[in-house]
């Protein structure tokens, strides 16, 4: 049984996709042991509670220094003894000590086809605004392991989505979520739960 901890900051539609996939049997041999948000108002916390999953908020704003937050945050993460940590729209920089401790055990969903439109400053709607500004015809989403860089870790799954004439950033964001993010994030968890993903030579290998 893979024990997963999901970290969130906002609406939690990716969390919902995971909850639904577990309930519907698309993710098997997996237990969601907890949800942590940095934002007390994140609707994701409600989604967790509705699903009967332990949920808590730990905000950097409640601590005097970032180092103090990082220490308490890592303690909270450790308390769940997770096998896999899933960043599902989590907007806080992961403490380096946590990345080292959970090497290749933290995955993130990013709303672009990495290495396009990723790295510092590319989050949320900004990603889709940049894609439309460049006029690309294909966008998508990526699930990757988290390393010390921003969106630089080994790529596990990607899925392409077509841009349509007249798209706004909001419309494109929604299509990328529906057609890519909500599919590949649960799929990556299912693959990891069954030992089908490993990292070799800095790259993720998926054995389907
Ligand atoms: C998603 O687009 C995800 O890729 C990201 O932030 C958004 C989170 O949405 N980086 P939600 O909270 O899962 O609804």
Image (spheres, rainbow, N blue to C red):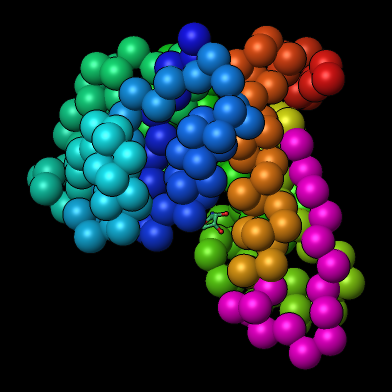
Left or right: 69 in relation to 165: left
Tell me if residue 36 can be seen: no
**Residue 165: in magenta span:** yes
**Residue lying at 68% horizontally and 33% vertically, measured from the top left:** 187
Image point (12%, 44%), residue name: 63
| Residue 178 versus residue 149 in the image, above or below | below
State which region is magenta: 157-172
Q: Is residue 97 left or right of residue 173?
A: left
The number of callouts visible is 0
Location of the C terminus by quadrant is top right
Residue at position x 46%, y 38% in the image: 19
Residue lying farthest to the front in this orientation: 24
Q: Is residue 34 above or below residue 137?
A: above
Residue 180 seen anywhere in this rendered image of the structure: yes
Q: Position of residue 179 (x, y in %)?
A: 72, 57
Could you say which is closer to the camera, residue 15 or residue 40? 15
- State the residue at coordinates (43%, 21%): 31
x and y, in percent, of residue 76 in the image: 23, 25
Q: Left or right: where does residue 16 sit relative to residue 53?
A: right
């Amino acid at each position: 049984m893979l024990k997963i901890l999901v970290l969130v900051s906002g609406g939690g539609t990716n969390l919902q996709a995971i909850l639904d996939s577990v309930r519907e049997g698309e993710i098997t041999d997996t237990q969601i042991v907890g949800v942590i948000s940095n934002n007390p108002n994140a609707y994701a916390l409600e989604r967790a509670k509705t699903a009967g999953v332990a949920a808590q908020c730990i905000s950097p704003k409640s601590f005097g220094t970032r180092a103090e937050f990082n220490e308490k945050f890592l303690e909270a993460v450790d308390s769940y003894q997770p096998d896999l940590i899933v960043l599902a729209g989590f907007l806080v920089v992961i403490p380096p000590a946590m990345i080292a401790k959970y090497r290749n055990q933290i995955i993130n969903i990013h709303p672009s086809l990495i290495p396009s439109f990723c790295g510092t400053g590319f989050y949320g709607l900004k990603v889709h605004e940049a894609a439309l500004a460049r006029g690309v015809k294909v966008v998508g989403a990526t699930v990757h392991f988290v390393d010390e860089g921003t969106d630089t870790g080994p790529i596990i799954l990607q899925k392409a989505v077509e841009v349509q004439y007249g798209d706004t950033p909001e419309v494109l964001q929604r299509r990328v979520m529906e057609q890519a993010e909500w599919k590949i994030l649960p799929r990556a968890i299912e693959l990891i739960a069954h030992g089908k993903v490993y990292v070799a030579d800095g790259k993720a290998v998926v054995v389907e």
